[in-house]
Amino acid sequence: LWGSRYVTDHMPVPRENVVAQLNMDMVGRGEASDLPVGNPDYVQLVGSHRLSTELGDLVEKLNKDQRRPLKFDYQFDAPGHPENIYCRSDHYNYARYGIPITFFTTGLHGDYHQVTDEPQYINYDHMFKVATFVRDIAAEVGNQPNRPKVDKPKPDPKGACQQ
């Protein structure tokens, strides 16, 4: 997280010009063999409604418009969830400055951060589907006449992250 913290503390562009941050990490897994709730369309979302109801609603609307929508799992986004996913990836360093975020992952499978996490276990079709969807969200957000409205309390940029 050091890199994203440094970038957000020393932005190369004015911070107010950053409209949203879409973060993907470990989106190549997610099958039933990886997770009890996994399936070919599985993806976990974290933070999509935490700062901006509008961004979260846009993500859901675009998903519903898909020929074969992804199946969103929000369980790791719950306040106080013991895995603390909201605080454990690069997106939070943007969120702490009030930049709306959405984190896409299928992480926490049995090989997570293990030497057994090898490329032969990646479902490249699934990874492509998630990446294409995130690309489409970025294009939609970028082409909106207004930035996603921040309608939730912003965290203290110097304070501790709260799951």
Image (spheres, rainbow, N blue to C red):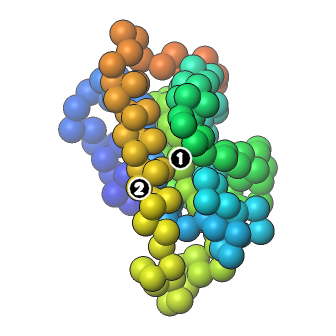
Residue under label 1, please give it. 103
Answer yes or no: is residue 93 visible. Answer: no
Q: Tell me the number on the disc at residue 142.
A: none
SS of the residue under disc 2: helix
**For this view, does 150 lie left or right of residue 78?**
left
SS of the residue under disc 1: strand
Amino acid type, residue under disc 1 in the picture: Phe
Marks 2 and 1, how far apart at CA = 16 Å
Q: Are marks 2 and 1 in contact (CB under 8 Å)?
A: no
Tell me where residue 98 appears, x and y as whole percent.
Answer: 50, 29
Instruction: Look at 51% across and 16% down and name the residue there.
Output: 149
Question: Is 10 placed above or below 123 here?
Answer: above
Amino acid type, residue under disc 2 in the picture: Phe
Tell me where residue 99 appears, x and y as whole percent.
Answer: 46, 31
Residue under label 2, please give it. 128
Q: Which of labels 2 and 1 is toward the front?
A: 2
Question: Which part of the image, by quadrant, shows the N terminus?
Answer: bottom left
**For this view, does 18 lie left or right of residue 44?**
left
Q: Nearer the viewer, residue 8 or 44?
A: 44
Which residue is the extreme one toward the bottom?
115
Which residue is the extreme one toward the front?
67
Q: Which of 82 and 131 is in front in this view?
A: 131
CA neighbours of label 2 inside 10 A, class few (<14), some (14 to 19), many (20+): few
Answer yes or no: is residue 117 visible. Answer: yes
Question: Is 161 placed above or below 32 here?
Answer: above
